C-alpha cells in the first residue's frame, strides 16, 4: 500500500522534473520471479525504477539504514520502505550471505528483485566490475536477469549531493531478459560460472548505458577517490 502511494506521488514529480525517456518496458516479465539488474550512479536510480516499471520492485538494504535517529532517520526509513526496500540484519553473521538468501526468497516468491551488481554507487559515473551475487541468485533460482540502464542520473545527483538537481532528460533502458541454463553444483567450476554470467550481464548494461567500463570494483575505486 505504501509503495503504491509513494510511486503514485513520485511519478508525476519525476516526469515533470526529469522528463524520463523509457524504452524496453515490455521486457519486464509481468508475472513470476525475475531479477532487475542495473547500473548504480545515484540514489535516484531506485526511484526511477520504482516509478517506471509496471510491477513493484523489491530492493535489499542493510538494516542499519533503517535505524537512523532523529528527523533524518525517519525520512530515510520512510523513503526506503516506500520504494520497496527490505532490511537485512547483518549482526548475526555475513551480510552478503543474508542478502543472497533474502534475494533468492524474493525471487522464489514470484516477485521482482532489484539489485545493483556493482555493489555500491559508482564514484565517478563509470561502470565498475560486477559482483557475482546477481549470478548466484539467478543460477540458484533459475530466474531471468533483466538488465537495465539509467542514463544521466549521475549528472543529476553525483556523490556528495543529497538534493538532486534538475538535469536534461534522464533515460531508462530495459534490455531483453537474460536466461542461463547453467546451475551451481558445488564444484570448483562454480566460480567460473558465476563470473561468466556476471560479466555477461555487465556487458549488456554497459552497451545500453554507454558508460566507460572499469576492471576493478567500485568500492575499491571509491577508497582511492575519497
Image (cartoon, rainbow, N blue to C red):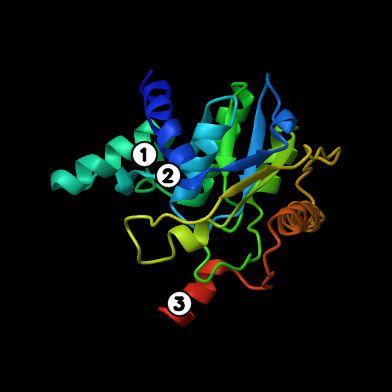
Q: In this view, does 130 lie to the left or right of 156?
A: right
Report helix, strand or loop for mark 3: helix
Q: Which residue is drawn at 48% across and 82% down?
A: 224
The quadrant where residue 215 appears: bottom right
Can you identify the residue that label 1 sits on?
80
Report helix, strand or loop for mark 1: helix
Q: In which quarter of the image is the N terminus?
A: top left
Can you identify the residue that label 3 sits on?
223
Q: Distance between the residues labelled 1 and 3?
A: 25 Å
Residue 119 lies, with reference to residue 92, above or below; the image says below
Q: Position of residue 155 (x, y in %)?
A: 49, 63
Camera-nearest label, 1 or 2: 1
Q: Is the Cβ of the residue at disc 3 closer than 8 Å to that at disc 2?
A: no
Q: In the rendered image, is residue 98 in sight?
A: no
Q: Where is residue 223 in the image (x, y as percent from the top left)?
A: 45, 77
Q: Position of residue 68 (x, y in %)?
A: 22, 47
Can you identify the residue that label 2 sits on?
61
Q: How far apart are marks 1 and 2 (CA)?
A: 8 Å
Label 3 neighbourhood size at 10 Å, few (<14), some (14-19), many (20+)? Answer: few
Residue 54 lies, with reference to residue 155, above or below; the image says above
Amino acid at each position: 500500500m505504501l509503495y503504491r502511494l509513494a510511486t503514485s506521488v513520485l511519478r508525476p514529480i519525476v516526469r515533470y522534473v526529469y522528463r524520463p525517456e523509457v524504452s524496453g518496458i515490455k521486457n519486464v516479465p509481468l508475472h513470476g520471479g525475475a531479477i532487475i539488474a542495473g547500473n548504480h550512479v545515484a540514489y535516484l536510480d531506485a526511484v526511477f525504477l520504482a516509478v517506471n516499471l509496471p510491477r513493484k520492485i523489491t530492493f535489499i538494504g542493510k538494516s542499519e539504514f533503517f535505524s537512523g535517529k532523529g528527523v533524518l532517520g525517519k525520512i530515510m526509513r520512510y523513503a526506503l520502505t516506500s520504494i520497496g526496500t527490505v532490511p537485512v540484519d547483518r549482526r548475526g553473521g555475513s551480510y552478503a550471505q543474508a542478502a543472497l538468501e533474502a534475494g533468492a526468497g524474493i525471487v522464489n516468491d514470484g516477485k521482482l528483485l532489484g539489485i545493483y551488481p556493482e555493489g555500491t554507487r559508482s564514484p565517478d559515473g563509470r561502470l565498475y566490475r560486477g559482483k557475482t551475487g546477481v549470478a548466484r541468485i539467478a543460477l540458484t533460482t533459475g530466474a531471468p536477469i533483466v538488465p537495465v540502464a539509467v542514463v544521466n542520473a549521475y549528472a543529476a545527483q553525483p556523490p556528495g549531493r543529497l538534493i538532486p538537481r534538475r538535469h536534461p532528460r534522464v533515460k531508462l533502458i530495459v534490455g531483453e531478459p537474460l536466461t542461463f541454463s547453467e546451475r551451481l553444483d558445488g564444484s570448483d567450476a562454480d566460480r567460473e560460472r558465476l563470473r561468466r554470467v556476471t560479466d555477461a550481464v555487465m556487458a549488456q548494461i554497459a552497451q545500453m548505458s554507454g558508460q566507460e567500463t572499469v576492471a576493478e570494483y567500485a568500492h575499491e575505486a571509491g577508497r582511492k577517490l575519497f
